[in-house]
Image (spheres, rainbow, N blue to C red):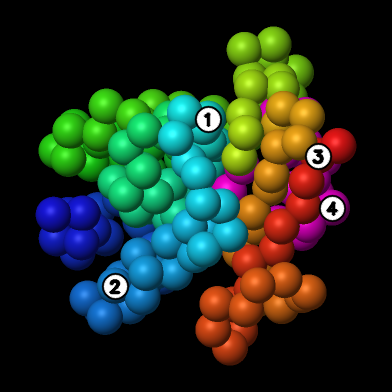
């Protein structure tokens, strides 16, 4: 159902550069790569920074029902789509927040509140660390999808980088 909604709403919500069913399927599959790194998601609090069309947050939330997911994006259109998907799929483990993620580090409701942070296609690694680390609990893990770097190779041109907050 998520795939069908993506295809229907892609243009109306300015969702993704993906254009075909096959491209969206690849994005969904790639979004599940963090499951290869973290085995136990039960009870974890996860934040998806710059969630956009829901990658990787929605596929992860569908497969990890016992984890809580906060999907954050600054775009009203994109968060409207995320709320639509949350409702249509009955994702009780998902909350959507329309807000600039850079502001969350100054909000006590979000500082040191998450076990895992994920992000795809949002800025450079140092920029992300400054934004994300204040949101992670001690020992929290940041998983970032990048085109290159020393990390877990998902496919040529896509790497999953991991850093832990100490």
Q: Are marks 4 and 2 in contact (CB under 8 Å)?
A: no
Helix, strand or loop under label 3: loop
Q: Are marks 1 and 3 in contact (CB under 8 Å)?
A: no
Sequence-wise, the earlier of marks 2 and 1 is: 2
Helix, strand or loop under label 2: helix
Q: Is residue 119 above or below residue 113?
A: below
Q: Quadrant of residue 89?
A: top left
Q: CA distance from mark 1 to mark 3?
A: 15 Å
User: Which range of residues does the magenta coloring cover?
Assistant: 117-135
Q: Residue furthest top?
A: 108
Q: On the rendered structure, is 147 left or right of 74? A: right
Q: Are marks 3 and 4 in contact (CB under 8 Å)?
A: no
**Residue bearing the label numbered 2:** 25
Residue 114 appears at what percent x and percent y?
A: 62, 29
Sequence-wise, the earlier of marks 3 and 4 is: 4
Number of marks in the rendered image: 4
Tag shown at residue 165: 3
Residue 28 appears at what percent x and percent y?
A: 35, 65
Tag shown at residue 45: 1
Sequence-wise, the earlier of marks 1 and 3 is: 1
Which residue does the image show at 81% across and 39% down from the upper left?
Answer: 165
Q: Is residue 156 visible?
A: yes
Pick the front one: 84 or 69: 69
Which residue does the image show at 34% across and 29% down from the upper left?
Answer: 93
Categorize mark 1 by other alpha carbons within 10 Å: few (<14), some (14-19), many (20+).
many
């Amino acid at each position: 159902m998520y795939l069908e909604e993506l295809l229907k709403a892609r243009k109306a919500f300015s969702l993704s550069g993906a254009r075909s069913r096959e491209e969206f399927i690849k994005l969904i599959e790639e979004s599940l790569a963090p499951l290869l790194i973290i085995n136990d998601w039960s009870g974890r609090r996860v934040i998806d920074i710059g969630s956009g069309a829901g990658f990787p947050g929605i596929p992860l939330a569908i497969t990890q029902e016992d984890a809580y997911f906060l999907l954050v994006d600054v775009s009203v259109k994109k968060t409207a789509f995320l709320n639509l998907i949350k409702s249509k799929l009955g994702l009780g483990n998902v909350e959507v927040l329309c807000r600039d993620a850079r502001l969350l580090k100054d909000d006590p409701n979000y500082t040191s509140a998450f076990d895992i942070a994920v992000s795809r296609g949002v800025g450079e690694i140092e920029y992300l660390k400054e934004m994300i680390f204040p949101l992670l609990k001690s020992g929290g893990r940041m998983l970032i999808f990048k085109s290159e770097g020393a990390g877990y190779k998902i496919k040529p041109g896509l790497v999953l980088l991991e850093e832990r907050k100490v």
